Amino acid sequence: MKRKNDAVPEAMVQRWSRPPLSCRFCRAKKLRCDRTQPCANCVLRKVPCEYTGQGPSDTSDELRGAHLSGNQPTAATVSTQQPAPTIPSTYSQTTIALHPNDISSRVTRLEEAVFDRIHVPRDPPSIATATQGSNNTNQSLITRGAQGSSNGCVTPLTLLPLASAQRRIADLHDYMRDTNSLSRCLPPWTQARQLLDHFNVVIQPTFGVFHIPSTRDLLEETYRGILEGEEPSPTVLVLFFSIFAGAVLVATPELLQLLNATQAEAKAAFTAYVRLAICILDNPIQSVPPSTIALEAISALARVLFHADWYSHKAQALRVDAICMARSMQIHRLDTVQRREERKRSGYNAIEVEVQRRAWWHLVSSDWISAFSQSPQEGTYLIHPKHMKVNHPSNIDDEFLTPTGPEHSFPLSVPTSMSVFIFRIHYAELCREIIDTLGTTLLESDQPDYETLLEIDGKFHTFIQSLPLFLRNDPASIQKSQDITQQRPYLAWQRTVAHLSFHVRLCRLHRPYHREGLTNPKFAYSRLTCIRSAQTVLDLRHSLEDTGVLSGFNPSDYSLVMNHVFFAAMVLATDVSMNPTAPGADTRKQEVLDVIHVLEKSQNVSASLMEAIRKNTQTLLSILQDAQRELQQQGRSPKENDIGSVPSGSGGTKSSAAPSQPRSVGVDENMTNVASGHLPFTASMHGSSHEDEDPMWSGARRNSWGQLWSDLFNVAPEMDALQWDLLLNDSDLPLQSNFY
């Protein structure tokens, strides 16, 4: 019997007529469709993307061909050929700028939805307790939680199994497993090559773990796989997101021009790349398995985040993760007799073994150097030298290292791309010896025995003298090694940064005896070494501007360099204040004020530098206010028009007081804002429109940090020992070990 249509239930007819959400191709191939027009699967396979009731899409070829075809246009050309906004954001992006609807934003919203504010349906009024007035808010949260109800901001344990909460968790679960979605945030092929090249210039010389030819091959293989519809592994994604983040963090104007991007877009891309890499590494659903590439990726991300001062806490955690992964891979036993014999029997990839050595020694040297730096882990290290058996990496350029070729190494006197990496290991071993020698002195914050200090000082100078000619910093060695540095410009930069680290630590070693060296001849050498090393740091900072140009390096872009400069400036400023009549004191005052000017303009590159400036400003303000109160108590209160007067340069303007009286201190109401945590106003912080007017010395900005130091130079001789100690302690800020 023929069925009648009216016998079919109406609800069933509606379900049959409901159009499928996935496109026809994804349904036919049983693929997960992202439900865009066209979807990513159709784009990768270059097939028409059709939905029920629609015709085929003609935009697939445009979407991918413009970026990943064999004949790729330049970044500037690609940027003018952007597809329609409806195309998925990743492959249609032609610059590294990420829009609010990108993958990073979506992950953030999912994380917040699941972990921060899980909204579930409100409870019936009969269960929920109504709150009246803001005074009852906390009691209401307690009452609702005890009764098992939700107020929309928190979710009691008994309500977590509800469908709405589980649905959000499931959404995050599915999204985190979808590497195809994450891979869409990779830049176009041309830009990826440019970013890797830039990383090789600005980060790799002080990182040294990557075998660059192999990394380039992996990049090409990954993008070819994407063209063929393959999904890159999470490990590879972390590696390249870390590389791209490092490249855009220190993007030069030349790179931005190649990418057709602005500095703001580069910063946004850095944040996105970092969050994507961390998101993959922290994914509890699909963890990154231990491998050589994973170890490279985590080490690179930690290195990049050490450059980004505001991520330093995460960088420390990543470094520990890398150490744990390396141990799980038994890399700390890489060159035991048993492992060497095993490699001979079964064969091995010489490049992979060498990269494992580089990764391990990078972690070890960073651990030991951090132990002798002004950082939270000072005085401690994680890796004991007797608990490992790993040879030093070979002193060889990457081009001469092949998977099947025999391992060999040049003498250390021969410059290679690994020369500084190997001497960094020797420097780390020296730092570990110093920590073992000082013992509990660092933990107890006591001054080291002076004879022990002189012994350590001798080791420092012996190490510096042992450096090869092209890494020495004296004028004669620099002159003799000019031919080498012209062939390898990165060596000049590496040499300068290395000596920057040497002299900061040497200065800090002698600083406990700096003030005593003024009055006690026994400690005069320590004061002289402090001044000499601090001055060397400032000179090296100037030379970095010259050597950095050749390597695409801007010292002001690196928080570590500016932190070192801050330390040296504080040592010199304190010394010239304690001894204002010494020969050349006026010249040194002006030099210190000039450096302070530079630091004020660069304070936004480093959170620790900004905090150190704020702390030092508070100390200066307190000292100057005490000096002014003392003048008032002595009946020598300055005239009203002298309050807040601005000294110029190092000498300042003359007060109308008698010559025998000390100059009045310029403290106004604006300065007191510093005591409550507000940084002094400078043009660098708020974009002053008076570009021709020096923001440091203008009367309208007399509450600047530099002006406070200028005022201090006039009252310094009357400061007591406690105030000097406060100033010296202000030079302490975390140095970390970004470079060395």
Image (cartoon, helix red, strand yellow):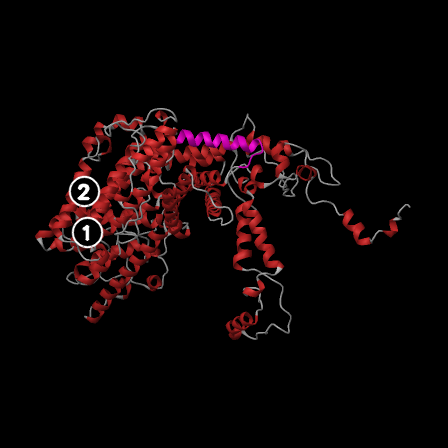
Under circle 2, the secondary element is helix
- The stretch drawn in magenta includes residue 196: no
Q: Is residue 233 above or below residue 569?
A: above
The residue where tag 1 is placed is 438
Q: Disc count in the image?
A: 2
In the rendered image, residue 633, in percent from the top left (x then y), is placed at 21, 71
Residue at 18% x, 42% y: name it: 460
Name the amino acid, label 2. Answer: Phe
| Badge 2 or badge 1: first in the primary sequence | 1
The residue where tag 2 is placed is 460
Left or right relative to 66: residue 489: left
Q: Is residue 610 above or below residue 361?
A: below
Q: Is residue 103 above or below residue 47?
A: below
In the rendered image, residue 552, in percent from the top left (x then y), is placed at 37, 35
Segment tinted magenta in the rendering: 211-231
Left or right relative to 695: residue 182: right
184 or 199: nearer the viewer = 184
Q: Is residue 37 visible?
A: yes
621 or 636: nearer the viewer = 621
Rendered-image quadrant of the C terminus: top left
Q: Nearer the viewer, mark 2 or mark 1?
A: 1
